[in-house]
Image (cartoon, grey):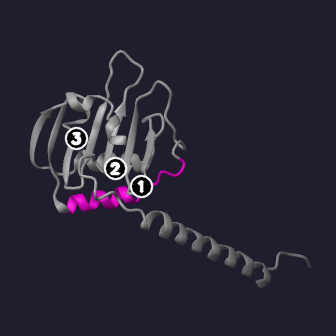
Amino acid sequence: MTGCKRSPRRIVPLVFAILVGALVIANYYETNVKSRKLDEAETKKPFVFLHMTPAFSPVLKCGVIAAVWNDGQIVRARSEGDIGKMYVKGMMSPTDLARIKQLVVQFSPENPNENGIVVDAAADILVVRFKSKIEVKGHSPPNTNDPEITRIRNELMNVAIVNPSEIDGAPYKAHPGDWYK
């Protein structure tokens, strides 16, 4: 009688491979995620910002979606429809600031073009300033959607602002090129 008998000799290599994979993943997290530090010394530029590039269309909707500085200052569009037009400026609570920092530290720029940016479509560009480098990732919703960018965008657009004041959007409509330096 022939059949598939499960041999302990076959299971041991499989268990060993799973354990090695788990150790590799844990090591990656320790060295690449946990050790990344935001640039806390930078005070003039935001540690995280999200901006929208325009689609190729007669209506140019573009500008900064939201930006957060190390001291908790936040500037964001008043609403999705106000990107590049009207903004709200204020401070975040220390709790919200810590939550946003934790969220962006976990942001993964791996495979930056995995979802990609569609030619002639609007794109959301997420920029995070770490001590050693600036990491950038983009997507073009609804054509391509990166869940990390979407989550950070939603968090930034919905976080409570202490003592908000409305400001003109003219300075935030242009591409924030100086923030990349």
> Around disc 3, counting alpha carbons within 10 Å, would you say few (fewer than 14), some (14 to 19), or many (20 or more)?
many
Name which residue type carries label 3: Arg
Find disc 2 in the rendering and name its residue: 152
Q: Quadrant of residue 107?
A: bottom left
Q: Quadrant of residue 76?
A: top left
Residue range corresponding to the magenta coloring? 95-111
Q: Residue at x 18, y 37 (%)?
A: 78
Position of the N terminus, as image quadrant, is bottom right
> SS for tag 1?
loop
Query: Is 106 colored magenta in this rendering?
Result: yes
Query: Is 169 colored magenta in this rendering?
Result: no
Task: Please name the predominant secondary structure of the magenta segment in the image.
Answer: helix
Structural distance between the alpha carbons of marks 3 and 1: 20 Å
Give the answer, above or below, for where 56 lies relative to 174.
above
Name which residue type carries label 2: Ile
Q: In the rendered structure, which disc, 2 or 3, sits on the residue that comes first in sequence?
A: 3
Rendered location of residue 171, percent (x, y): 22, 31
Residue 55 is tagged as none
Find disc 3 in the rendering and name its residue: 76
1 and 2 marks in contact (CB < 8 Å): yes
> Around disc 2, counting alpha carbons within 10 Å, would you say few (fewer than 14), some (14 to 19), or many (20 or more)?
many
Structural distance between the alpha carbons of marks 1 and 2: 9 Å
Find disc 1 in the rendering and name its residue: 107
